[in-house]
Amino acid sequence: MEKKNHLIDITLNNLDNVVSEYNTNTLSNNLGNYIYKECQGIPIKNNITLKITTDLEITEEEKKKISDLIHAYYGLEVQDNLIFNKYNLIRNLVLMFLGFITLVLAFNIRNKAYNVIPEVMIIIGWILLWEVLYYFLFDNLKSNIKIKRYKKLARCKIKFETKKSN
């Protein structure tokens, strides 16, 4: 099955809109957010092509810099999200371990203590396990979709087109 290619149109009226106002070697957050929002709803399997249309005279060096800025921006987003997922995984493994320990302790002290303490421990244990289950069923899926989109954008084709002035 052939992958479809989705085209995202970008109209560039000023080169200053491409770079961050704080660092000319970084893509503007406004442009980065616009591109990401435009690719939401596109099936993840589809390839993405950015078509940058402008009436400005852009040199090959500037085109390469813009392309590199876009690819680097989304490459960093991939790295950030992978780090976030790693820490979330560790946190959830610790929560799962604590949930199991809490449940085991609650069942072992059930007849040895007041009835309230084991019941509270059972509730806490199940809440901890539910948090882990919720992460793996819902949050992790959302995060993985976001990472796949960022990877597509980090490797996307970028075409430049000059508008014809009348």
Image: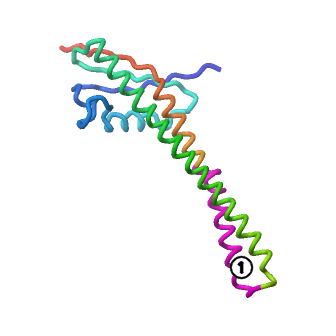
Q: Quadrant of residue 113?
A: bottom right
Instruction: Please state if 154 lies on the left or on the right of 65 as rendered.
Output: right
For badge 1, the amino acid type reads: Glu
Q: Considering the numbered disc 1 on the image, is that residue within a helix, a strand or a loop?
A: helix
Q: Position of residue 45 (x, y in %)?
A: 58, 29
**Residue beneath the point at 40% across and 23% down:** 50
Q: Quadrant of the C terminus?
A: top left
Q: How is the image coloured?
A: rainbow
The residue under label 1 is 119
In magenta segment, residue 131: yes
Q: How many marks?
A: 1
Q: Main secondary structure of the magenta part?
A: helix
Q: Position of residue 63 (x, y in %)?
A: 32, 17
Q: Quadrant of residue 99?
A: bottom right
Of 36 and 28, nearer the camera is 28
**Residue beneath the point at 44% across and 34% down:** 76
Q: Is residue 75 above or below residue 140?
A: above
**Residue beneath the point at 36% across and 35% down:** 32
Q: Is residue 88 above or below residue 128?
A: above
In magenta segment, residue 129: yes
Of 105 and 34, nearer the camera is 105
Q: Residues within 10 Å of mark 1 (few under 14, many from 20)?
A: some
**Residue beneath the point at 37% across and 21% down:** 67
Please report the bounds of the magenta region as a residue range. Answer: 113-139
Q: Position of residue 120 (x, y in %)?
A: 67, 78
Q: Quadrant of residue 37?
A: top left
Instruction: Please state if 105 lies on the left or on the right of 6 as rendered.
Output: right
Instruction: Please state if 74 lies on the left or on the right of 146 as rendered.
Output: left
